[in-house]
Amino acid sequence: MKTKSVVALATALILSLGAGQAWAAGCLKGGAVGAVAGHVAGHHAVVGAIVGCAVGHHMAKEKARNAAQESAAAQVH
C-alpha cells in the first residue's frame, strides 16, 4: 500500500511540474531509463524515474540550445 501512495504522489508531482510542453521534452525517455536503472539498482524505480525525467529534460534543453547556436552560426556565414 505504501508503494502505491508513493507512486501516486510522484506521478502527481511530475504532472503538476510538467504542465507545459517545454518540460515534456526528454522527460518520457529519461524517466523510462531512470525507472529501469533505479529498479536494477535496488528497487528505487520511482526515484529513478523522477531523476531520469529531470536529467532527460536537461539534456533535451542542452541539445535544443546547441542546435539553435549552430543554426545561428550557419546563417551568419
Image (cartoon, helix red, strand yellow):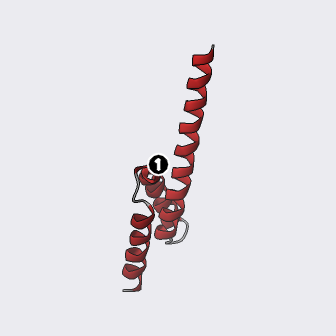
Q: Residue at x 59, y 26 (%)?
A: 70
Which SS class for mark 1? Answer: loop
Residue at figure coordinates x 51%, y 51% from the top left: 57
The residue positioned 40% from the left and 74% from the top of the image is 7
Which residue is outermost to the bottom? Answer: 1
In which image quadrant can residue 74 be found? top right
Q: Residue at x 63, y 13 (%)?
A: 77
Residue 39, horizontal then vertical, whole percent: 48, 66
Residue 68 image position (x, y, % from top left): 56, 31
Residue 19 image position (x, y, % from top left) = 39, 59
Circle 1 Cα neighbour tier, 10 Å, few/some/many (<14 / 14–19 / ≥20): some
Q: Nearer the viewer, residue 31 or 75?
A: 75
Q: Which residue position is annotated with label 1?
A: 26
In this rendering, the answer to whether 27 lies above or below 15 is above
Classify 8 as above or below 14.
below
The amino acid beneath tag 1 is Gly
Q: Residue 3 sits in which quadrant?
A: bottom left
Q: Nearer the viewer, residue 14 or 34?
A: 14
How many numbered markers are drawn? 1
Q: Quadrant of the N terminus?
A: bottom left
Residue furthest top as drawn: 77
Vertical position of residue 40 compared to residue 27: above or below = below
In-image side of 69 versus 44 (left or right): right
